[in-house]
Amino acid sequence: MATSSEAPAAAPVSYRQSGFPSIPGAVDILLIRHGESQPYTPGNPFPVADGHGDPPLAPEGHEQAKLLADRLSPARIDAIYVTNLTRTAQTAAPLAARLGLTPVVEPELREVHLGDWERGEYRQRVAERDPLVREVFAQQRWDVIPGAEPSAAFEARVRAAIERLASAHRDQQVAVFTHGGVIGQVLALASGSRPFAFLSADNASISRLVIADELWIVRGFNDTAHLEP
């Protein structure tokens, strides 16, 4: 029986579509907004921590913190950060307990200071559609509020804090429990967007940022799958 001496044809080279690459030295930052805090009652201002209104979590916020821990406890998280405001520490507590991690306080990631509207008044003015609130959003500047933190100063302290975290946690994933204004500022810096483009993170939501040296990459925003029925 005759046989062929020809070698089989080589399979053609092909390249599958790839997902997000692993970048050596990058840090994966989960930006988590704190759970819902206690409501504001006019005439009963929030307590203060370092000049900032410091309400604790509402019962709904504690439940959100537990659901968040359910979501993230299987993940590889190397460090947990909180701010100097109570609501972030309380939100992080269930996850920290499950992972056996001690949260590190990063005060420079505290919420933007709202000047004369600290201690709860901002919430009331938003609910009542105060004309000055509309001006804040029209100009996309917090310092439209009397006595509020200048926008440039807020941007600078948030950027510096994120850069410190990125430098300290290369090739790691960290969970940062922070505030809605801070998340909006970080993602605006990363994307080059309008200042308030990401100012809509829900309580206990997860946003994601990957930093590789000077490159800031937005990988997710306002993930609330763990809170849905």
Image: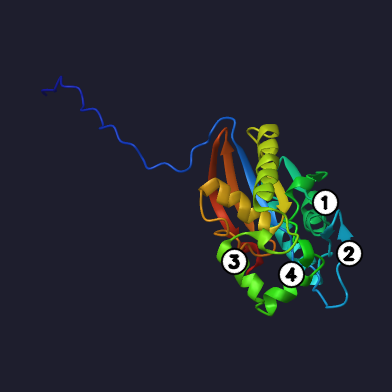
Q: Say if 142 sits above or below 176 in the image.
A: below
Distance from disc 3 to disc 2, alpha carbons, whole Å, reads 26 Å
Can residue 76 be seen here? no
| Viewport quadrant of the C terminus | bottom right
Q: Which amino acid is tagged 2?
A: Pro
What residue is drawn where x is 53% and y is 36%?
22
Camera-near label (3 vs 2) is: 3
Q: Which residue is mark 3?
A: 137
Return the disc, 3 or 2, that comes first in the chain's sequence: 2
Within 10 Å of the Cα at label 3, are there few (<14), some (14-19), or many (20+) other Cα atoms?
few
Q: Secondary structure at mark 1?
A: loop
Q: Which amino acid is tagged 4?
A: Tyr
Distance from disc 1 to disc 4, alpha carbons, whole Å, reads 20 Å
Q: Which residue is mark 2?
A: 47
Return the disc, 4 or 3, that comes first in the chain's sequence: 4
Q: Which amino acid is tagged 1?
A: Asn
Camera-near label (2 vs 4) is: 4
Return the disc, 1 or 2, that comes first in the chain's sequence: 2
Q: Which residue is mark 4?
A: 122
Q: Which residue is mark 1?
A: 84
Q: Secondary structure at mark 3?
A: helix
| Percent x, y of residue 127 | 69, 78
